[in-house]
Image (tube, rainbow, N blue to C red):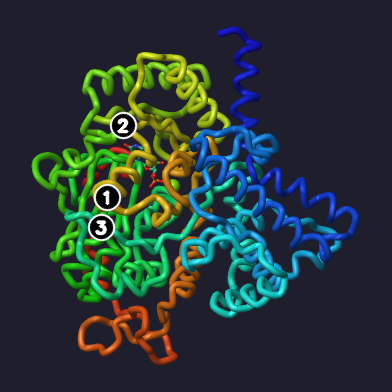
Amino acid sequence: MSFSSRRRNYLLTHHRRDGLIEWMKSMLMHSFVLDALDTTGADTFSHFEMLIEEHREICASEGPKARSSRLTQLVPTCGTFHTYLPLRRAFDVYNAKYGLTKRKHICISFNELRHILNLAQIMALCSNHRRCYSTEKENEEQAQKHLEALELRSAMDLLHSPAHLAAVAPEGCPPSLNLNGNGSYHTRDAVDIGDSRRSFRGPTMITFDGDQTLYSDGANFESNQELAQYLYLLVRNGVTVAVVTAAGYEYQTEKYELRLSGLLAFFKDRGMSTDDCERFYLFGGECNYLLRLGSDFRLHAVKETGTGGWQTATRNLDDAPGNWDELQCTALLDMAEECMQLALEEQRLKARLIRKKRSVGLVPLMNELIPREALDETILRVQSELRSRPDITLPFCAFNGGRDAWLDCGNKRVGVEVLQTYLGVPAESTLHIGDQFLNTGNDFAAREICPCVWITSPEETTYILKSILRLAGVPLNEKNREKGSESHGRVGDAGPAETQVATLNLKEVERRNDQVKTMDVFTGEMITKS
Ligand code: IMP
Ligand code: MG
């Protein structure tokens, strides 16, 4: 490849990072400079909302790749909008709380826009309104209601937390955006969700990225009780919860259990019912290994083929793993391995390659740190190499994991789509929450298949779940221990005011954590302690 075409590729790929949020930022800048944000800010969000809705209508009639809308002319890289987005309302709520438009020196930032988009997305999923750039008065009343429901206390604190500041993305594409689904149709394979699901006003299924969304990069879910409590409440209210992670250890279930040790111990301590347990899934290796929680609080492989097998049930999806050709997998991995090896040598990285059945990884040598630029370069090389090969038709994901770089067979679009098909959950009733929505990240692919929320830390995930539960009408401060308690933390339960923090079976967590410390999260190998 010539230098100029390489350079062009670089510019093209980086241009893809300047998505909707960058465009919104530039639109708001004019008013800010003219000191007019206070009077025109909300109208600008109405305008965004209208352009997105117009785009959605065009896509509905011309297909999801339609490029003739005004929005695509302004933002050629915008993703799919799966639901209506009440952006003005979300802005009103956020602005009422934080007074963004009163600021004189600092314009609305990338991260504030990300928060407003996230808020609009969860509002869309948790209420029935469709189009609502209605009258100003109606909007104000609704915004006030949402504000009260949400008690938006912590978004600003999060913006200034060290974890957040470290993770701030300077540029990037927006999460994909979308409509409510209270339609909870399920296939025969789906668990019977009973009454609670019917009254829960929120997504039917929430899929979560693992690293940096539920736990810090490379760490495990240890004792984050607040997050565990919200996940528990979601499952209790009939929501299917699935961790869709790139981490792949084939069907060695104990390795995934180790990574989720604190969460599983929390569920066990709560005495979660069998039905509720069975609503909790983990998809390992992006879309390769499907596991489900059993009543013994252990993860079990879901059968792949035959009646009720997940691969058999998703054969109608062209890209689903049940249709993959093993020779193609090998060819894909060989090419990526060769490309990564060259990247490792040319950039003189203190790294090594790992080859697994469905992935190749470039990971740091002990205690070394691979620079972000080198990881991005490696990934962009792999992506452009694989895209230039017409014989490669398998879905794949080449991504920068923060400390490492990977090529996986399959991606999170396939993972989420398989779950939607297998469990009978429509796209607009699904929500994916993740931290990697740049084009070198592995949550990016999920934008195609469902609404997404882009977070940057487990603290933000906690905040988002709290907001979803509040908007869906779930009491948060109840005594909702399952054993011997009258309230079960379901919609309609009237719990007492004080929060009851679950007392965890700490011995169990310690036992599991002890084991966790001895596992290499890249390979899944156990490291014997001396
Ligand atoms: P996620 O953020 O939950 O999708 O996890 C991504 C991280 O999982 C990567 O950054 C790696 O550190 C780790 N990982 C472990 N095994 C694999 C694998 O086989 N493919 C990709 N990532 C892996
Ligand atoms: Mg992640």
Q: Position of residue 16 (x, y in %)?
A: 60, 33
Q: Amino acid at mark 1?
A: Thr
Q: Which residue is mark 2?
A: 319
Mark 2 or mark 1: which comes first in sequence? 2
Q: Residue furthest right?
A: 34
Whether residue 18 is visible, yes or no, is no
Gap in angstroms between the C-alphas marked 1 and 3 = 40 Å
Q: Is residue 267 above or below residue 85?
A: below
At numbered mark 2, what does the secondary structure look like: helix, strand or loop?
A: loop
Give residue 74's quadrant in the image.
top right
* Residue in front for this viewpoint, 67 or 272: 67
Q: Residue furthest left?
A: 306
Q: Is mark 1 within 8 Å of ligand 1?
A: no
Q: Nearer the viewer, mark 1 or mark 3?
A: 3
Mark 1 or mark 3: which comes first in sequence? 3
Residue at 60% x, 66% y is 155
* Label 2 crowd (10 A; few <14 / some 14-19 / many >=20): many
At numbered mark 1, what does the secondary structure look like: helix, strand or loop?
A: loop
Gap in angstroms between the C-alphas marked 3 and 2 = 22 Å
Q: Amino acid at mark 2?
A: Asp
Q: Position of residue 520 (x, y in %)?
A: 30, 43
Q: Which residue is mark 1?
A: 518
Q: Is mark 3 within 8 Å of ligand 1?
A: no
Gap in angstroms between the C-alphas marked 2 and 1 = 36 Å
Q: For the N terminus, give its image quadrant.
A: top right
Q: Nearer the viewer, mark 3 or mark 2?
A: 3
* Residue in front for this viewpoint, 174 or 312: 312
Residue at 42% x, 53% y is 428
Q: Residue furthest bottom?
A: 496
Q: Horizontally, is 128 left or right of 478 in the view?
A: right
Q: Which residue is mark 3?
A: 186
Q: Is residue 264 above or below residue 353?
A: below
